Amino acid sequence: MELPEERVGDAVVLDARGRIDSTTAKEFGDRMIGLIEAGCRRLVVDFKNLAYISSAGFRALLLAAKKAEETSSQFVLCGISGKIKQLFEIGGFTDLFNIYPSREDGLSALR
């Protein structure tokens, strides 16, 4: 898994690449929560380049969303498609997160 980040104005875009599974989910979650705790109030997680996410990855997302809510931060997801989208739908996670088709749409929603 790779997690390059990009600052766009006052937002941070975290580009999740590869696989988020039991071995990488902690790093993924720690990175999102670390950004929020460091003062990031607008976070976009882009899944365009993600190949797989496990239940451990979904747990990391839920914990990051909770931290964002506690700190009045905005937290959105984007670029979810194909098999990743199916996993979100099967698990009922599409109703729990603000999900946008593209990075640009996610950033626009934060403005």
Image: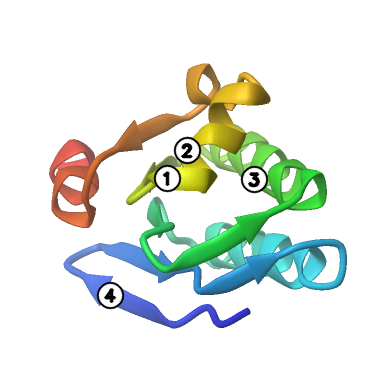
Q: Label 4's element?
A: strand
Numbered disc in front, either 3 or 4: 3
Numbered disc in front, either 1 or 4: 1
- Number of the label disc, if any, that sits on residue 82: 1
Residue labelled with disc 3: 61
Numbered disc in front, either 2 or 1: 1
Q: Is residue 38 above or below residue 3?
A: above
| Gap between marks 3 and 4 measured at Cα | 20 Å
Residue labelled with disc 2: 85
| Residue 29 x/y as whole percent | 70, 60
Q: Label 3's element?
A: helix
| Gap between marks 3 and 1 measured at Cα | 19 Å
| Gap between marks 2 and 1 measured at Cα | 5 Å
Residue type of the residue flagged with mark 4: Arg
Q: Is residue 50 above or below residue 84?
A: below
Q: Label 1's element?
A: helix
| Residue 78 x/y as whole percent | 34, 47
Residue type of the residue flagged with mark 2: Lys
Numbered disc in front, either 2 or 4: 2
- Number of the label disc, if any, that sits on residue 7: 4
CA neighbours of label 1 inside 10 A, class few (<14), some (14 to 19), many (20+): few
Going from the N terminus, do you reach mark 3 or mark 4 first? 4
